[in-house]
Image (spheres, rainbow, N blue to C red):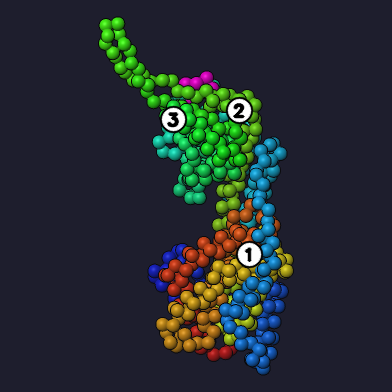
Amino acid sequence: MLEVTATATRSRQSSQLLGHGTLRENVKAMQESNKPMWRKPILIGGLGLSAALWAWSSLQDALWQTGEFGVLSLAAVGTGAWWLQQQSRRVPTPAATPVDRAALERELARVRAAIAQLQAEVPHADTAVWEGQLAQLPQTLERQKLRVAIAGGAGTGRAHLAQVLANEPIKAAIDIAETATPLVGTDDDAATRATVLAADLVVFLIHGDLTASEWDCMTFLRGERQRVLLALDRQDRFLPEERAAIWQQVRDRVCPTLDAADLVAIASAPAPVKVRRHADDGTVGEWLEQTAPDLIALRNRLQQLVATEQSQLVLAAAWRQARAIGADIKAQLNRARRERALPVIQNYQWLSAAAAFATPVASLDLLATAAINAQLVADLGAMYCQDFSWQQAQTAAGALGRLMAQLGLVELTTQAVAGLLKGNALTYAAGGLVQGVSAAYLTRLAGLSLIAYFEEQELPAGGELQGDRLQKHLQAIGEQTRRAAIFQDFVRGVAQQLQARAAAPAS
C-alpha cells in the first residue's frame, strides 16, 4: 500500500493547508466516519454515473473528444450559474438599528446557545469564565457614569484632551480613558479595539478631513454600534473661511454615517497668542499668552448625551461585551471543528485524485469530482451546523466550480501541475496524473475555502452560501496554497501516491 514520506522542511502551515496521508489511512478514516460511504447518496450516485458513462464511452470515443479546459469550464459554469446570479442580486445589509433591551436579550440568548453548542461538541471545554462574565453583564447596566474613550491617531492630542476634560464639570458624570485609534483588518491591535469597544462612547479626534485609516476605523466602530463623537480639533489654527470649508467637507463626508449633532469643533490646545503692550513711557512689551481651551461644543454634546441617552449607550456597551464573549466561544468552537474537518477534506481530496487518475476522459472525471465535491459540501456543512439538502449541496458545489473557473484557478492549477511534473519524463507520461493531482488540489482548495467561510458565520449558522464571501476565501487560500514550496510538496506527494497505486498489483 501507499505511503508518503514527509520532508523535514515541511512547515506546520504546509501540513494544514496541503496535508496528505497515505491512501490506506484516508480510506480507513472515511470508512470510520459517522456516516458510511454507501449512505452518501450524492457521492455514490455521482461515482456510479461516472463509471457507467466510462463503460459506454469506451465504445463511443468519438463523442468525447472535447478539450479538457472546455469541458471543465462547461461543467463548472453550467451547474452554478443560476446560484451565483442570485447571489449577485442580494440587497445590501441595512444599517444597524440602535441597541435596546430586547436586542441585548437576544444577544445574551445567542451566546448561551453558543456555550451549549461548545459543550455539546467539545465536552472537556471549560466555559466557567464565559458563564461568569455573562452572569455579571446585567449588573453593568446599573452604572451611573458613562465610560468615554478618547481615540485618535498619533499626535492628535488624546492625552491632553483627557487631562482637560478631567478638570471640566462633566467629569462628575463620565470616566475617561485615552487610547490610540484601533487598526482595522489586523490582529495586531486587539487590545486597543477591546478598550474602544468596551467604552459607552468614543470621542474621535481629527485635525482635518479624515484619512483613509481614520474613515475605516470610524466605519468599523459604527458597524459595532459604537456611538462616536467626531471632534474636529485645532480650529484656532485656521482662518475663518478655511475653518468653514474644512467643517463642511468633513460634515458632507460623515453625516450619512454620523448624526450631524455628533460632529463638534473644538480647540483643545490653542496656540499661544502674541500680546503687545505699549507703556506710557513709550516702551513696547511683547509676550506669548496661553488662551483657554475651547471645548464648549464637546462639553454641551456630552452633557446632552448623559442627560438623554445614557441608558441606551450603556445597553449598547453591554451588547458589545456579550458579542465579544460570543466571539471567544466561536473561536474555540472553530478550532475544534477545524481539527475534525481537515481529515475529511483530506479523504475527499484523495477520492478526487483517484477518480480523475483512473478515468482518462476529462468529462467523466469532472462528473466524479463534482459528486465528490457536493458530498464534501454536505459533510462540512453538517460539521458547522449548516445542513444542506442533496440539491443544495449539488448547487453549492457547482457554484464553487464556477467561481474557480471565473478566477482562472482551474487552468492555472492544471498548468502549474503539468509544469512541475514535466521535469520527470516517466512521471509526466503517466496517463491521468496531471488530472489526478489537479483534482486533489482543487478539492482541497474548495474544502479549505468552505471551512474559512463557515468559520466567519454567526452562531447559530444558517442561510444560503454567499458567492462574494466564498470568492474572497477562494482567492486568499488559493494564493496561500500556491506558494512554491507548499505547492511543490503537495504535487510531488500526490503524484508519488498515484504512481504507486497504478504500479500496485490489483487485489
Q: Nearer the viewer, residue 199 or 161?
A: 161
Tag in front: 3 or 2: 3
Lower sequence index among marks 3 and 1: 3
Query: Which residue appears at 45% of the width and 88% of the height?
Result: 426
Residue at numbered disc 1: 380
- State the residue position of label 2: 305
Q: Which residues are magenta?
A: 165-170
Main SS category, magenta section:
helix
Give the residue at x 47% y 85%. Answer: 428
Residue 373 belongs to magenta span: no
**Disc 3 target residue:** 238
Residue sitting nearer the eye, 437 or 154 = 154
Estimate the x, y position of residue 399 in percent, counting from the top left. 64, 67
**Amino acid identity at mark 3:** Phe
Give the SS element for disc 2.
helix
Q: Amino acid at mark 2?
A: Leu
**Residue 166 on the magenta segment:** yes
Taking the image as shown, residue 69 lies to the left or right of residue 267, namely right
Residue depicted at x 59% and y 38%? 255
Q: Is residue 269 above or below residue 345?
A: above
Looking at the rendered structure, the secondary structure element under dot 1 is: helix
Q: In front: 219, or 43?
A: 219
Q: Residue at x 61, y 75 (%)?
A: 73
Q: Nearer the viewer, mark 1 or mark 2?
A: 2
Residue 303, image x and y in percent?
A: 58, 24
Residue 343 position by quadrant: bottom right
Query: Disc 1 or 2, which lies upstream in sequence?
Result: 2
